[in-house]
Amino acid sequence: MFPIAATSASPRSWTRSPHWALDHGFENVATGTNADDALYPHRPGIRAGRERGVHTPLLDTGLSKADVRRLSRHWSLPTWNKPATPCLASRIRYGIEVTPHRLTRIDRAESALRAPDGEGEAEVGVEPCLPAPKP
């Protein structure tokens, strides 16, 4: 298994991640991309990772999300039924730059919308700003 040295699906992050991994003693970068993720034709993070040599062992072996959950439960991993948490960059519409500031704002907004115990789901998106209506 490869060490996971990158946590963002943002194509911009793939520019830095393989270099960061090599600088820190990792020979490979891998993601949790699985067979279900490859069903969607427009996934820029998957394409960017492939272009930069990022490994996808779950996808390469044909494991689906259900397979990963089943194996996780079999191995008694506490996260076997944890809700899916897509990359924060997926909340930003295509064509809008992914920046640390935008990702932080999304994370804070979603945290504020979740139940006090941190449970539940909340998603916030970033859309292009529309001009204010003229009076």
Image (tube, grey):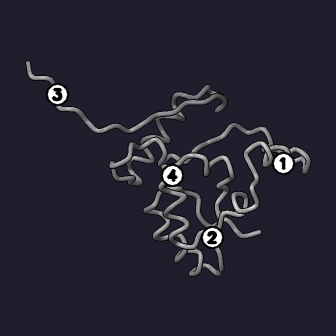
| Closer mark to the observer between disc 3 and disc 4 | 4
Q: CA distance from mark 4 to mark 1?
A: 25 Å
| Residue type pointed to by label 4 | Arg
Pointer 3 residue? 132
**On the rendered image, what quadrant is the N terminus found in?**
bottom right
Marks 4 and 2, the one that precedes in the sequence = 2
Disc with the residue nearer the chain's start (3 vs 4): 4
**Mark 4 or 2, closer to the camera:** 4
Distance in Å between CA atoms under marks 3 and 4: 32 Å
Q: Secondary structure at mark 2?
A: loop
Q: Amino acid at mark 2?
A: Val
Describe residue 109's horizontal placement relative to residue 66 as left or right.
left
- Image check: 17 left or right of 56? left
Q: Which mark is residue 127?
A: none
- Badge 4, how many Cα within 10 Å: few under 14, some, many 20+? some
Q: Earlier in the sequence, mark 4 or mark 1?
A: 4
Where residue 29 is drawn, which disc sits there? 2
Q: Residue at x 47, y 63 (%)?
A: 13
For the residues bearing labels 3 and 2, Cβ distance under 8 angstroms: no
